[in-house]
Structure formats: C-alpha cells, structure tokens
Image: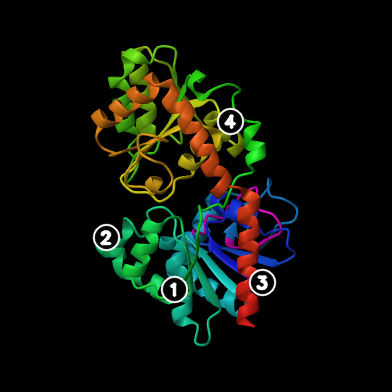
Amino acid sequence: MRILFVAMAESIHTSRWISQICDQGWDIHVFPSTDSGVSHKDLRNVTVHHSLYRSQKNSDSSVKFHGIPVFSGIIEGIGKKILKKLIPNYRNIQLLRLIKKLKPDIIHSMETQAAGYLTFNAKKSFGGRFPMWIHTVWGSDIYLFGRLKEHREKVTDVLKSCDYYISECQRDIKLARIFGFKGDVLFTSSAEGGFDLQACLKLRQIGPVSSRRIILLKGYQGWAGRSLVGLHALERCADILEGYEIVIYVAASEVVIAAELFTESTGIPTRIIPYGTPHQEMMRLHGKARLSIGLSISDGLPSSFLEAIVMGAFPIQSNTSCADEWIVDGKSGFIVPPEDPDIIASAIRKAISDDNLVDNAAQINEETAKRNLDFFLIREKVIELYTKLVIDKS
C-alpha cells in the first residue's frame, strides 16, 4: 500500500498520526503542506518531499528526504522567495507531479487551509482519475475559517471534492455536511490519534489530583488564543492561590510580559515553559497539575485538553471547542466563555476549593481516556481503515 500524506511535516500531530501505521511495511510519503523545510524528529519509515530543506540532524535514519538540501535557513528562505517569484504556484505543481509519479492508493490531507487547499488544486488540475482522497479537519479549519469570506468557497471546494472525511468531533461533521461534503465519514478522532495510557500513568504525580499545586495555562494569544484572559481570571483568584505555581506553555511574547507583571502584583510565582519542550515533559507537567486552562475563540479538539484528561488535571476549556463532547460541565471539567474573566475566575475558584470535584473528575476522565484515547485501540482501527479502503477499491 502506498499512502501520500499532504500535511505539516514539522507537526507533532502529523508524526503521531503516522506513528500508528509506520511499522506496517507500507510505502508512506509526506508532502509538507507548509513547505517549512523541517520534518518532525519523531517521523519514522517515511519519505518526505521538500522543495528546499535544511539539515535534518535529529531525524531518524529510516526517514528519506527528497528535494534540494541547503546549509542554512537563510539560503532556504532566499531560494523559496525566488521560486515563489518565478513560479507563484510552484508547490501546486510539485504536488501534482508527485501524485502522478507515485500513483498512491490513498491521498490523506490533514488540515484544511494548507493541505486541503493544495490537494484540491492538484485534483482540479489532475486530468484523470484522482486517487482516493481522505481529508481530516483540524482545530478551527471550518468552525472559524468557514465563516470567513476569504476561505468560505475554498473550504466548500475541499469538502465537496474529498471522498472520505475524518473529524475531531460531531460538531465538525455537521458543519462539513453544511459545506457540501457528500462522502463517508470514517470516524471521529483526535488529530494525532491516541496515547500510550500505561506509559502516561508512570508520568503522573502519585496521590490524589487535589494534592497537586500547579495550574497549567496554555499561552496562546493572538487571532484565536486568549491566554491573557486566563491570567486576568487567575489574578481575580489570587487570594486563594497561595502555595500554587502558574505554569504557562507555548507563551506568546505579550503573555510572558503579562506573567511577570502578574507575579509582581500578586506574589504568585509563574514559570514559562519554552517552545520545543519534549512532549513527554509536557505530559509530565499535566500529570502534576491540578488545573489545565485552555482558552480560545475557536478550536476543535485541543491536544492540551486531551492531555489534561489523560493525566488527571481538571480541564477548564473554552466553549468554542469540542470539549463539551468529552466532559460534563461542572462535573468532569468546566466549559467557559473564552473572553469572560469573571466566569473563568468563578470556575477556577470552584476547582481550587472543591477537592472532591477534581478527584472525582479525574476518575471520570480516566475512564473516558480508556474508552476513547488508547493508542493501541485507535491504531488498530486506523490500520484496519486504510486496509479496507484499499481492498474495497481493488
């Protein structure tokens, strides 16, 4: 079997999804949808088709690279600018040529605004029978971008053209139908598949969740993230946070500054987790956290939310995500508006003051993880899915 993934090669979501099938002896290829010149270090047994790419020192020896190797990011950047000036749609052309050369059994695009648009353009220009096309929606792909004038038609083109669809949640399945998807929904799954739950268990702090004294805050701030609202909510709860540490990850520059000012005004320590921190360490942090707060004006099924569920941290998640399909508000987590610090502060106060709430939620969420997030169960389902599709096609 030959599968061509059109996806962000640098993304942990891409590498973790492919990890489910990379030991099957299949011929797996990745066409980087963002042309970043970087591949995730955890990729295994794949061929990555860059245009220009830097040295991949941390890559596994099983990974093959096609494209033009360069010695620095500066040279790479200049080369891509020249390419784009001379051939504005050079990536479309490269993908089209690759599809015709490889003749994959399956094309699987993961994410819409880069991968989905590229794959649609390739299909539109293909001039023959296009390979079977599976599309996976990530995060805000259609929930937010589908409402924007610039993207509405493009999102519709992708969803009308793909054969199969994988969604993170039921919300996006309904939206896909509205945007014209007529094919089969294969199943719902997180963007990266599941978790090795036994390995995760070893990373959890011993004892009840109520004994933990870390509050995790996702540091995204910008077009969607609302980490600063989270800090404002925590500031309103300063009187009950003595002995706690606020740990912020993937923090935007303005969030780093706000965190320092937060500590100065409240005396509550904050710690910034640097970008690029290994995933295992992030899981360990969730395993030490009492609360995990994620706020955004738009999202799908956030990885950080699932990590909280798996590691026992009590999730406080914005109501613009699909979290409501996984937890019961007020029982196994809190669903909050992303831009209301008062409501978020009320949720934080409740989760800090009620030990029984967070301990019971951890037990409920652990059972949810066992049913729906076990890597080995999801892996088996994914392998069976690809195999059946190819067999049925032949």
Q: N-terminal of the two: label 2 or label 4?
A: 2
Q: Which residue is mark 3?
A: 2
Mark 1, mark 4: which one is toward the viewer? Answer: 4
Three-letter amino acid code at the position of disc 3: Arg
Answer whether residue 186 is visible to the viewer in this image.
yes
Q: Is residue 48 magenta?
A: yes
Q: Which residue is mark 2?
A: 148
Image quarter for residue 2?
Answer: bottom right
Three-letter amino acid code at the position of disc 1: Phe
**The C terminus lies in which quarter of the figure?**
bottom right
Q: N-terminal of the two: label 4 or label 3?
A: 3
Three-letter amino acid code at the position of disc 4: Arg
Segment tinted magenta in the rendering = 34-51
Residue 393, compared with residue 385, is above or below; it is below
Seen at 30% across and 66% down, the residue is 152
Seen at 64% across and 43% down, the residue is 196
Residue 376, compared with residue 21, is above or below; it is above
Image quarter for residue 390?
Answer: bottom right
Secondary element at tag 1: helix
Q: Position of residue 143 (x, y in %)?
A: 33, 57
Q: CA distance from mark 3 to mark 1?
A: 19 Å
Residue 243, compared with residue 249, is above or below; it is above
Q: Which residue is mark 4?
A: 284
